[in-house]
Image (cartoon, rainbow, N blue to C red):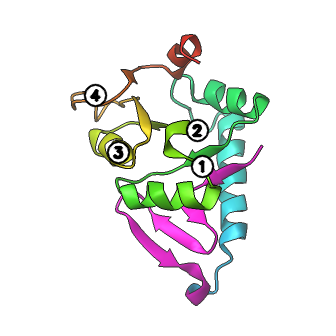
Amino acid sequence: MRILHSHIISQYILFGGIGTIVNTSSLGVDAGQVHQLITTLFNQALESGSVTARPGVKWIRDYAQQNDIKLVFASTTSRDVYHYCLDILQLDASDCLAIKDSNSGLLAAHSASVKCVAFPNEFTMQQSYEQALIQVDDLHQLNAKI
C-alpha cells in the first residue's frame, strides 16, 4: 500500500488549503524526501500519542492499509488539485471518496466529481454539508457503510 500526500506529489508542493502549487525543483528540494519525512513524522506522532487523532482516523488508516487502499492526504479547496491527484494516481473520481472537515473542502471534492463524507471539526461543525454522502463525528461510523 502507498500512502501519498497530495501536498507533495512528484516535484510539487501544495501549500495548505489555498491551492498554491510550487515547483520544488527550483528550490533545490527533493519532494519525494519531503513526502517521506512528513509521512514518517505524522505516523510517529500518531503512534506516540503526541498528536491526538480525531475519532476513527487511526482506524481508517489501518483499514486502508489492511485492505490495500490508497490514501491521499489533500488539504485543499481546489478541484484542480483533485484532478491533478486523480491524473497522477490514474484513478477515476467515481472510485474515490474524500473525507473533508469543511464545506469548502467538500465543495471542491464534489466539483471534481469525488464523493465526500463530511467529518466536521469543532470550528466547522456549524457549516452546511448538504452535498455530503453522510456526515459523521467519528470515522468508525463508516464501518457500517464500507
Determine the secondary structure under disc 2: loop
Count numbered badges in the picture. Answer: 4
Q: Is residue 20 magenta?
A: yes
**Of the image marks 3 and 4, the number of the one nearer the N terminus:** 3
Read off the residue under disc 4: 125
Determine the secondary structure under disc 4: loop
- Calculate the distance from the C-alpha at mark 1 to the C-alpha at mark 4: 30 Å
The amino acid type found where label 3 is placed reads Gly
Read off the residue under disc 2: 51
Determine the secondary structure under disc 1: loop
- Calculate the distance from the C-alpha at mark 1 to the C-alpha at mark 3: 19 Å
Determine the secondary structure under disc 3: helix
Q: In the rendered image, is residue 98 in sight?
A: yes
Q: What range of the chain is rendered magenta?
A: 1-26
**Of the image marks 1 and 4, the number of the one nearer the N terminus:** 1
- Calculate the distance from the C-alpha at mark 3 to the C-alpha at mark 4: 13 Å
**Of the image marks 1 and 3, the number of the one nearer the N terminus:** 1
| Residue closest to the eye, 9 or 111 | 111
- Calculate the distance from the C-alpha at mark 4 to the C-alpha at mark 2: 21 Å
| Residue closest to the eye, 25 or 46 | 25
**Of the image marks 1 and 2, the number of the one nearer the N terminus:** 2
Q: Quadrant of the N terminus?
A: top right
Read off the residue under disc 3: 105
**Of the image marks 4 and 2, the number of the one nearer the N terminus:** 2
In the rendered image, residue 6, in percent from the top left (x then y), is placed at 55, 57
